[in-house]
Structure formats: structure tokens, C-alpha cells
Amino acid sequence: MKIVIAITAASGALYARLTLERLLAAPEVSEIALVCSARAREVMAHERVVLPEDARIRTFANDDLFAPPASGSARYDAMIIVPSTVGTVGRVAAGAAQSLIERAADVMLKERRRLVFVVRETPLSLIHLRNMTALTEAGAVILPASPSFYAAPQDIGALCGTVADRAVALLGVDVPCYEWGE
């Protein structure tokens, strides 16, 4: 599988790192296109999050609209925006792509491919909810960054890992994770 992973400046860069680690652990993931918004790297530095490095990761600048994820002919299988700002949600919902992240998301929608937004915002306004509804109606999945406590996680990484597990599963990647009733 070829996956696009986009990171925006929402707090919660740990979700991005954990999602990336899970994708790299999956043998069916052959390529990852990584795109960070202008402020995402600043947020990652502030939150002391370092992303893993791997030969399968190709990094693209968010202003590079000639990068492969900007075209449906690049044939990426799925995309995740983790964490996603509600500003990114709004621009994609409006069809107003001005960056590679937004254009790649637009491509996923028009090509009817998997698109997951891990939204990290609270509380949500009516505008936010309407934008998320529009994306859901267009075929995207909205996954609020709401960790699960079922498996009794022992630390923040394990707690946030429950969101990363769910996100990766929604992309169609099979990774070991907690299942209810175990």
C-alpha cells in the first residue's frame, strides 16, 4: 500500500509519530508520502516529538503542488491527516485546496479513496461540525483524537496509541491492537 500521511499544526504530534510507527511496522505498506504544514514542525519541536526515519518515507514540502500526492495518477491508496486542525477540515470541506495537504485530501475524495481526519480540537463549533459532516458525506472518515481506556493503558503513549491503532485500521492496514472482549 501507498499511504499519504499529513501532519498539521494541531496539538498532538504524538498521534502522528505513533501512526507513522504503526504504518512502518506493517509489511503491506510499501511507501509513505509525508507532508507537514508550515507550523507542524514547530508544534512537534514544542511537544518534543521526533518522527521515525525509514527508507519508505518520502517527504514533500506542503507548498509543492507538483508532488505526486497532488495527482490521482500517483495512485496512493489512502491518506490520513493526523493531527488535523479544524482549519484544514474547513478548507478541504470547501474544496479550497491551497497546499499539498489540502490538494492530496481533495484527490482522495475525488478518486473515492480512503481519507481519515484525526481531528484534535475541542470544543467544536457548529461550523466545525458542519464541515466534518460535509467531509463525511463526501466519503471521508472523521476520527476525533479521543483515546480509549478499555485496555487500561499504563502511560500516555499507550493511551494515544489507541487512537493511532484505530486510525491505521481505518486506512485498511492490519496491525495488532486491542480488541474488545480479549
Image: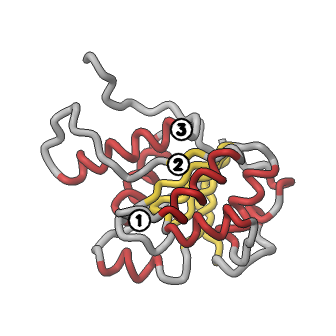
Q: Is residue 66 above or below residue 131?
A: below
Comes first in the chain, label 3 or label 2: 2
Specify the amino acid type for callout 2: Ile
* Left or right, 109 with reference to 133: right
Specify the amino acid type for callout 3: Leu
Tell me the SS state at disc 1: loop
* Left or right, 15 with reference to 27: left
According to the image, label 3 marks what residue? Answer: 170
Which quadrant, please, contains the C terminus? top left
Residue drawn 54% across the image and 35% down it: 173
Nearer the camera: disc 2 or disc 1: 2
Image coordinates for residue 66, horizontal then vertical, percent: 81, 74
Specify the amino acid type for callout 1: Leu
According to the image, label 1 marks what residue? Answer: 51
Image coordinates for residue 106, horizontal then vertical, percent: 74, 60
Comes first in the chain, label 2 or label 1: 1
Residue 55 appears in the rendering: no
Local crowd size for mark 2, using a 10 Å CA cut-off: few (<14), some (14–19), many (≥20): some
Q: Are marks 2 and 1 in contact (CB under 8 Å)?
A: no
Tell me the SS state at disc 2: strand
* Left or right, 52 with reference to 34: left
Q: Is residue 75 above or below residue 34?
A: above
Residue drawn 20% across the image and 53% down it: 156
Q: Which mark is residue 142?
A: 2
Local crowd size for mark 3, using a 10 Å CA cut-off: few (<14), some (14–19), many (≥20): some
Residue drawn 42% across the image and 51% down it: 144
Residue drawn 47% across the image and 47% down it: 143
The span from disc 3 to disc 2 (Cα, nearest Å) is 10 Å
